[in-house]
Every structure is written in C-alpha cells, then in structure tokens.
Amino acid sequence: MDESPVAGPAASTVDPPRVRRTRDRRGRGMRGPGILPTSLGTPVLRTARERFDALVLDVVTEVDDRWHRQLGIVEYAVEDTPLVPDDWAAETVPLSSLIRGRGSQPTRLVLFRRPIEHRCESRDELHALVLTVVVEQVAELLGMDAEDVDPRYRS
C-alpha cells in the first residue's frame, strides 16, 4: 500500500495539542516547582487535618500545663472517626474517648476530628468545642467540675 499523504481537506487536520499528565504515576507524590511556596516568606498551606491537630495541640497544652501534676502522664491523640459497632443505637457519634491507664500504660484521651468538625460552622466554634471536649474529659479524670478545670468552659 502507498503510505503517501492524501491531498484535500482531510490532509489539513491538525494533531490535537498534547495534554500534560497530572497524575502521580509512580506513587512518589507531587513534584516540581508547582508545590513550592511562591516566596520564602509565604507559608505553605496546611490541610484541614494539620490545622485541627494544631488547634488540639494548643488547647491541650494550655489545659495540661495547668493540671499536669494532678493528671500524671496522659497521651493525647486525634483520630478521624470513632470505631462504632454495626449495631450502634445511639443517635449521636462520640466526640472523644477516654481510656484510663493501667499499670505502666498511660491514660489516653482521643479526640475524633470529623464528628467535631461536623458540628462547627466557624473556626471560633471549632476552638470552643475542642476546648469543651478536652476540659470535660480532664474534669472526668480529676473528678472535678469542668468549670473548675478551665474558666472558659461553656456547657
């Protein structure tokens, strides 16, 4: 067969422009200048999870600094969602979990990010709810009223 180009209208077709692939083909994450900050003074954007973790760290640091001697060693953690059984009958999802320490295992306070964020419409509401949850759990550990643990507590 003759492979010569055909003359006429069909010969004037232009190849479509090449589309640049943006997928992560080898699992190494995004690379290149597109992920760098625009200047040295520009902060890198943080994810919702990182912002929530920073907020929890601020609140926990304030409360733990005040009550560290009475609390002893407490591990604070953040999980996305609680693991609830399939036959869960309660109408609300827990916002936190408190596991008292035994022997050499420290007490563990876990906050659940997604249920907490779901109940808040603004950053101020989120801060207030995180403070409320942490103060209530610390009050439970200390056997005190939440108002005595932190005067900013709102029931």
Image: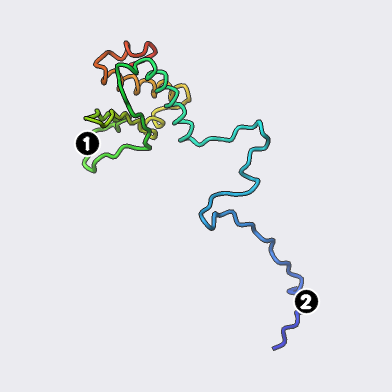
- Tally the marks: 2
Q: Which quadrant of the figure contains the N terminus?
A: bottom right
Q: Residue at horizontal 40%, vertical 32%?
A: 118
Image position, residue 30 (x, y; %):
57, 49
User: Which residue is under mark 2?
Assistant: 8
Q: Nearer the viewer, mark 1 or mark 2?
A: 1
Q: What is the crowding at mark 2: few (fewer than 14 residues within 10 Å), some, or many (at least 20)?
A: few
Q: Residue at horizontal 70%, vertical 66%?
A: 15
Q: In the structure shown, which secondary structural element does the residue marked by tag 1 occupy?
A: loop
Q: Residue at horizontal 30%, vertical 33%?
A: 93
* Displayed quadrant of residue 6: bottom right
> Along the line of sight, which residue is nearer the eye, 74 or 34?
74
* Displayed quadrant of residue 117: top left
Q: Outermost residue, right direction?
A: 7
> Along the line of sight, which residue is nearer the eye, 151 or 128?
151
Q: Which quadrant of the figure contains the C terminus?
A: top left
Q: Residue at horizontal 75%, vertical 74%?
A: 11
User: Which residue is under mark 1?
Assistant: 89
Q: Are marks 1 and 2 in contact (CB under 8 Å)?
A: no
First-in-chain label (1 vs 2): 2
Image position, residue 26 (x, y; %):
53, 57
Q: Name the side, left or right, on which 89 lies relative to 76.
A: left
Q: In the structure shown, which secondary structural element does the residue marked by tag 2 occupy?
A: loop
As measured in the structure, the alpha-carbon distance from the residue carrying label 1 to the one carrying label 2 is 73 Å
Q: Amino acid at mark 1?
A: Ala
